[in-house]
Image (cartoon, rainbow, N blue to C red):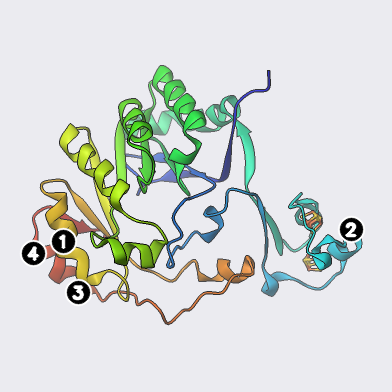
Amino acid sequence: MNPMTGRIFNIQRFSIHDGPGVRTTVFMKGCNLKCRWCHNPESQERENQIMFYEHKCKDCGACRQLCSRMFTGECINCGRCAEICPYEARELCGRDITADELMSEIKKDMIFYQTSGGGVTFSGGEPLLQSKFLFEMLKKCREEGIHTAIETAANVSAEIFERAAELVDFVICDVKCIDEELHRQGTEVSNRQILANVSALIKSGREHLLRMPLIPGFNETQVDAVAEFAGESRLELMPYHAIGTGKYSALQREYDENEFFVPQKEFMEQITQKYDNVFYDK
Ligand code: SF4
Ligand code: SF4
């Protein structure tokens, strides 16, 4: 029987923003939201993708000699052109990894987890879309005594969400807005199931953190509603930034840089001062 695999697009070691202590963050590929401001657009598609950074290309022709599929629209994302590009202008985003291979990667930093109270965080994309693989990883980590967290948008069935919450030590959950129509406009999906899952999480008493991406031009009018929904849960505001926009052109996608705005520090201070449980990383 073939070993179970998951599809990831990055493993980031020594992360300090995705849960307690020093962590390894595993970015899983594929998401069922299409947030218009997403700063990791390479996470959205489940399929592997070739990213092409035009500014790095020296037009040496090596990739064109290797394969003509890039001109015919028949690229199968095999990644060979990325391997041979001498200037790293082409990059294969996404790879399959077995649970044992991923455990070996995670265990490299065991000493840092133990000394800092850290562990591993499964992020994305949406880790709960690969629930079988994720559950396997959570069980393995538990056997090894490694603290686990998931970072999720919660747009999955209650059954999957609850099972994950049982297996993981810490849940970081996004709430983008309360207004359903606005949520559809920003992400292409309803937030009904998301809010039901988050609501159940809050009631469960399991350790969690809510996060709201604060995107002026989309949801700046929704902070009060989200803070009210959060109740006594901690709510971290994640201010919009435009760092990932170059990735859109690398994926041959359009991105309107004037649609959203980076929030002013004063605005962030003003909001967070209003609530005891709302904060942002200064
Ligand atoms: S191999 Fe790399 S540098 Fe050369 S033409 Fe292709 S993308 Fe450009
Ligand atoms: S990823 Fe593979 S199929 Fe696609 S252009 Fe590169 S070599 Fe050709």
- In the foreground, 276 or 50: 50
Q: Position of residue 269 (x, y in %)?
A: 16, 69
Ligand 2 within 8 Å of the CB at mark 2? yes
Q: Which mark is residue 274?
A: 4
Q: CA distance from mark 2 to mark 3?
A: 52 Å
Amino acid, disc 3: Phe
> Would you call the spot at circle 1 few (<14 residues within 10 Å), some (14-19), or many (20 or more)?
few
Q: To which quarter of the image does residue 188 belong?
A: bottom left
Q: CA distance from mark 3 to mark 4?
A: 11 Å
Q: Which mark is residue 267?
A: 3
Secondary structure of the residue carrying tag 2 is helix
Q: Residue at x 50, y 29 (%)?
A: 132
Q: CA distance from mark 3 to mark 1?
A: 17 Å
Q: Residue at x 50, y 37 (%)?
A: 130
Sequence-first disc among 2 and 3: 2
Q: From where the camera sits, is residue 238 visible?
A: no
Secondary structure of the residue carrying tag 4 is helix
**Mark 2–mark 1 contact, CB under 8 Å?**
no
Q: To which quarter of the image does residue 203 belong?
A: top left
- In the foreground, 189 or 255: 189
Amino acid, disc 1: Ala
**Mark 3–mark 1 contact, CB under 8 Å?**
no
Q: CA distance from mark 2 to mark 1?
A: 54 Å
Amino acid, disc 2: Leu
Q: To which quarter of the image does residue 191 belong?
A: bottom left
The correct choice, above or below, for 257 with respect to 84 in the image is below
Sequence-first disc among 3 and 1: 1
Ligand 1 within 8 Å of the CB at mark 3? no
Q: Which mark is residue 67?
A: none
Q: Which residue is mark 2?
A: 66
